[in-house]
Image: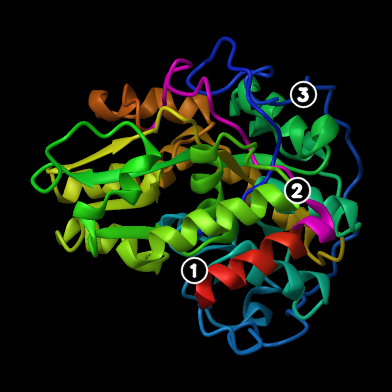
Amino acid sequence: MKTRNKVLAPILIGALACGLTTGCLQKVDDAESAQKTAPAAETAAPSAPAENTASSEAGSGTESSTSAAESTSGADTATQPGSGVVYVYNWGEYMDPEVPKDFEKETGIKVVYDEFETNEIMYPKVAAGAATYDLICPSDYMISKMIENDLLQPINFDHVPNVKNIDETYMKQSQGFDPGNKYSIPYCWGTVGILYNTSMVKEKVDSWNILWDKKYKDNILMQDSVRDAFMVAEEILGYDMNTTKEDEVSKAADLLIKQKPLVQAYVIDQVRDKMIGGEAALGVIYSGEAIYTKRENPDLEYVIPKEGTNVWIDSWVIPKNAKNVENAEKFLNYLCRGDVAEKNFEYITYSTPNKAARDLIQDEDIRNSTVAFPTAEMLKNSEVYTYLGEDGDALYNKYWEKVKSS
């Protein structure tokens, strides 16, 4: 599934409509009306990525490339009525595989679907023009960075009428990284917390401090993500998770180094699988994965620690160099349909900002789940990540290398 290095601003939780209000994520700014702009002209025939996306990962070894629509050449359908192609770049396992297929059947537009594992793998590939995508799903802070570096084009909301299904709460929340809602439409959101096995952990779990408890040595899983790892330490120390003060980042690193002998592993997707299999007692995990794990292992429970946590949002954007903008808008509009968004939610289990989709959730326990849709009280100490800038990134990377090499 996904790992993240999200980024936004502090949360003043006000009223929540199954999520976070404007003040809630400021911890987030108020919305202006979405600006509308005409899409760039689309090429007459499908435009393939500049490089073979299955082999242009610069040796990352972590990214997969799949054609979710299971079709062959975009050129094969180019002459059919309503045909064409759209190149999509999304997190791994972050969309029901049937959704692109269904879209293709309805529209005749072929979906070429590639996957990435981290924002940091996605960004340089897009920034360098190594491949040309039409629709990408970055995290909040990365969207801010892409806007700053002029990599995105404004979305023409006249061409995406189903955006009306996105709860205004999340459009307002997005103001923290996309002022005016010009460039993005929310797809999923959630929290970072602790997943624990009740058959192995008998005490109350309500604090990040339990991840430093020596009795759980070799039974603790941490996220192999610089921001998420440092966030845990910074919350314990009472620091802002977006701090760029070197003395604070250094102390957070020292705390992570102190914890390291207790940690079984720093992992990404394996937190989910190891916890389901009973291979660890405690793990740092994303709320969407927590919903899935509990379905597979009823002994697992998820908690948002009292010190606070990160609240994140992933959104769809259209790159500035997209060649098939009209098809990107059609696919984006399709994804915002209530029934399609509900289908994706059932598959990926990450919280949906789509109010029409939430109304369609049949399982009452899930529809009312505080894991999927936490209350304002649960989020009162939470924050969102903000883009730290190049100097801030360099600072964290410096101390992350120290942690990993210790």
Main secondary-structure element of the magenta-colored stretch: loop
At which x and y percent is residue 379? Answer: 49, 24
Mark linked to residue 29: 3
Residue 86 visible in the shown view: no
Rounded to the nearest angstrom, the CA distance separating label 1 from label 3 is 38 Å
Which residues, given as a range, are shown in magenta? 372-392
Residue type, label 3: Asp
Rounded to the nearest angstrom, the CA distance separating label 2 from label 1 is 43 Å
Q: Identify the residue at horizontal 26%, vertical 34% (top origin).
A: 205
Residue type, label 1: Ala
List the residue tagged with mark 2: 244
Q: Nearer the viewer, residue 205 or 278?
A: 205
For the N terminus, the image quarter is: bottom left
Pointer 3 local density, CA inside 10 Å: few below 14, some 14–19, many at least 20: many
Q: Identify the residue at horizontal 79%, vertical 74% (top origin).
A: 45
Q: Nearer the viewer, residue 23 or 389?
A: 389
Question: Residue 321, relative to residue 298: is it above or below?
Answer: below
Q: Earlier in the sequence, mark 2 or mark 1?
A: 1
Q: Earlier in the sequence, mark 1 or mark 3?
A: 3
Mark linked to residue 69: 1
Q: Secondary structure at mark 3?
A: loop
